[in-house]
Amino acid sequence: MPKVSHPKVVVTRELSNSVMERMSQLFDATLNRTDEPMDRAALAAAMASCDVLVPTVTDEIDAALIEGAGERLRLIANFGAGVNHIDLKAARKRGIIVTNTPGVLTEDTADMTMALIVSVPRRLEEGEKLVRSGQWKGWSPGGMLGHRIGGKALGIIGMGRIGQAVARRARAFGLSIHYHNRHRLPEMLEAELAATWHPSLDDMLEKIDILTIHTPRNAESENLIDARRIGLMRPHVYLINASRGGIVDEDALVDALEAKRLAGAGLDVWKHEPRIDPRLLALPNVVMLPHMGSATFEGRMATGEKVITNIRVWADGHRPPDQVLEGWV
């Protein structure tokens, strides 16, 4: 792998000041200080003229853009762990390395997931709105009743870093842990988490009280939770998604919530961000967040540092530490 002296780097969104300043010092960096997402023409122009593209989840780097990229482009250093917005096969075909930033946002996302797990059954958002409305009449024995989460069964789809971090938090709240994963966890880790593996997702859905999703979005997971699978869950179940929009069929979810075939939902991600189905906005039993599961100062700094490390190692002629290898899902 040849060295690249002072590579031309294009960053598609505004990052933290310290990260952008460091990039300017190390590379020939073009930064997006407006923080407006690049349109397709701007992305194509950037990819035609740089050695390294630093995209984010808002940038759809499809096969056509990659095939039209200039000969200089040899590294796509993604700002974030998920790479479902990048056509990996097209990149490999062109000999373009793709890197991501795994691990740095695990705890932040798990914290937000746990906040949703608590807030939806306990109706925290409804209570906050009631106080702000000025219509709260004070405490009463039957006021704002929700459900305790201790003693309930939590189902986790995807038991990677984030799923395991959620399981550790959930155990402290008295939840029993059930999980569905492509591969079973090692026996020692399963014992540490007191987690029960369900090789069949359908089987797990029939047994849980709260469902949380922590699997990447890809061809296999698109609409993984559809109308049929929602129908397997009992009406008192709460659904939490802080992973990726599109894993849950939003139309089926709305239908189930409106018909009270699900008790509620906590959503931090959306299929057509930033557009949200107005039917979801009208439902009182849905806690909605603006894709902020990883939004901490510390997490954004750590992500930027990983991007810089991947670029520097690659520019020095070595394989970057966070290269996305074939078979990644």
Image (cartoon, rainbow, N blue to C red):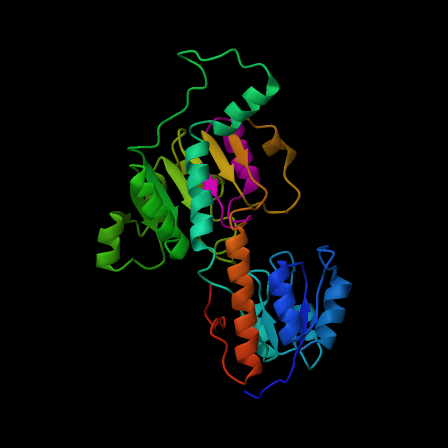
Say above or below: 191 vs 255.
below
Tell me residue 65's x, y (percent): 69, 69
Say above or below: 1 vs 149.
below
Q: Please tell me whether residue 259 belongs to the stretch shown in magenta.
A: yes
Give the residue at x 65% y 33%: 278
Say above or below: 196 vs 208.
below
Asked if residue 154 can be seen in this view, the reply is yes
Tell me residue 298's x, y (percent): 51, 55
Tell me residue 241's x, y (percent): 48, 44
Left/right placement of residue 228 relative to residue 18 reads: left
> Which of the pair 219/181 is nearer the observer?
181
Residue 24, image quadrant: bottom right
Give the residue at x 57% y 75%: 311
Asked if residue 230 can be seen in this view, the reply is no
Image quarter hosting the N terminus: bottom right
Left/right placement of residue 185 relative to residue 116 reads: left
Give the residue at x 34% y 47%: 167
> Which of the pair 223/43 is nearer the observer?
43
Q: How many marks?
A: 0
> Which of the pair 186/80 is nearer the observer?
80
Residue 64, image quadrant: bottom right
Give the residue at x 49% y 39%: 227
Residue 206, image quadrant: top left
Say above or below: 244 vs 139.
below
Which residue in the rendered view is the most extreme toward the bottom? 2
Q: Which residues are magenta?
A: 239-261
Q: Please tell me whether residue 117 belongs to the stretch shown in magenta.
A: no
